[in-house]
Image (spheres, rainbow, N blue to C red):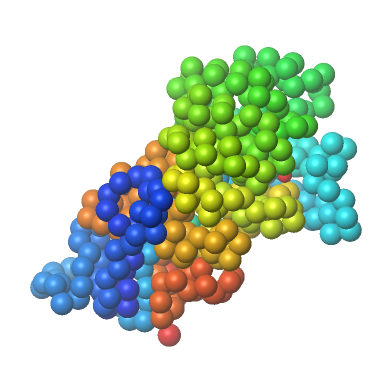
Amino acid sequence: MAKLLIRDLRQVVSPAGRDAPLRGSALGELELIEHAYVLCDGATVEAVGPMSELGLVDSEVEDVDGTGLCAIPGLVDCHTHPAFGGDRVDEFSLRAGGASYEELHAAGGGILSTVRATRAAGEGGLREAVERHRGWMLRAGTTTFEGKSGYGLDRATELASLSAVRDAGGAPTFLGAHATPPAFDDADAYLDFVLADVLPDAAALAEAADVFLERGAFDAGQARRYLEACRDHGLALRLHGDQFTESGAIPLAIELGARSVDHLEATGADGIAALAASDVTGVLLPASALFLARPMPPGRALVDAGAAVALATDFNPGSAFCNSLPVVMSLAATQLQLSPAETLAACTVNAAHVLGRADRIGRIAPGFAADLVLLDAPDWRYVAYHLAGDVVATVIKDGTVTVGRAAY
Ligand code: NIG
Ligand code: FE
């Protein structure tokens, strides 16, 4: 495969060392090289260093002029819901007028309105939607994404959602326990169905399972039942927890050895201490808190207590219609009191850890995937500093320039 040299970069920045996940003070430690190059061999980084150490380069190597640009690792979005039909713009307008997300959900709107639109989209419509959403993410610098099912809640649409995510290059997560569809009397009856009729085939398509553990969705006992069955089918475990209430998500995640517990807007001191003492990563979703005008998750306290934290968009049509990790980094810096360096590690190496891929993605280092974002900015921290700015100039995925515009 061809070699690609990105030369004369203003800065190359990568989370320090090789450990994953990064915690405490290590979360903010970066390796920064000024006036640097990155040499890619096919889909893998071969070398990175200062221009002064770049030896003679073969004339066959494709050259990218990095003058004026800063390179960061390709961003990793470890929590998205891209497999949906329709939109929730009417609900968005109602919320602006004072209706709450939980009220809309309880009235059969919210998630269930997207379930109706997703079923109606059919397999082809769903594939198109996931492709479109993946394109939005890629243009914002996301080179690896996780994508959940959870808007089908029937066999055909759940499996089509997982296939669409997988075929778009994403890491599929089976969110079979997102809500109880109206055809079932209660959550237990729905779980009987989903575990017997959907899980066996979903497990062949997905890498992980997820559940919405929350009042009005699934309680801790139901979440345990769902997750244990998914674990028995070989899936890694994730939880939506502590979004509105502390309903036992953190203790359950720890007990079951889950990869992550995500949201945490309602997490208090005991939850922070428990998570910090565990191997479960807390995935923070500040765009969701912003979009729903909810309290922000306790990001600074989690990091200071020693918890492993990651950042993600939660991209979905209802609670976080936001596909941009740079925007999430800005929110984390301004609302969660994380330093720009901490925000970068949280949506590169630590997000890669949540997806079980930290040996291959999340860093710019020899042997890692040639996934890079080139920022058109005088300092890499503009990715967080320039709120919703147009800083992502070029996106390189597996050594190929996928999104690009000339530097100016
Ligand atoms: O992570 N909270 C549950 N699930 C999604 C929202 C889904 C929706 O509103 O459509 C979330 O916020
Ligand atoms: Fe979510």
Residue in the image at 67% along x and 35% along y: 246
Q: Quadrant of the N terminus?
A: bottom left
| Residue occupying the far left of the picture | 56
The front one of 150 and 166 is 150
- Residue at image x 40%, y 48%? 23
Residue closest to the eye, 312 or 339: 339
Q: Is residue 67 left or right of residue 314?
A: left
Whether residue 111 is situated above or below residue 37 in the rendered picture: above
Along the line of sight, the residue nearer the viewer: 6 or 21: 21
Residue reaching furthest to the bottom? 408
Q: In this view of the protein, which residue sits in the foreground, 203 or 76?
A: 76
Quadrant of the image containing the C terminus: bottom left
Could you tell me residue 143's position as x and y percent? 44, 55
Name the side, left or right, on which 107 lies relative to 327: right
Q: Position of residue 6 (x, y in %)?
A: 28, 71
Image coordinates for residue 105, horizontal then vertical, percent: 81, 39
Would you identify the image quadrant in which residue 241 lies? top right
Query: Would residue 247 be visible to someone looking at this image?
Result: yes
Question: In this orientation, does residue 173 appear?
Answer: no
Left or right: 356 in relation to 232: left
Residue 14: name its quadrant: bottom left
Q: How many numbered circles are shown? A: 0
Rendering quarter of residue 270:
top right
Which residue is at 51% across, 68% downward? 384
Residue in the picture at 25% in, 60% down: 40
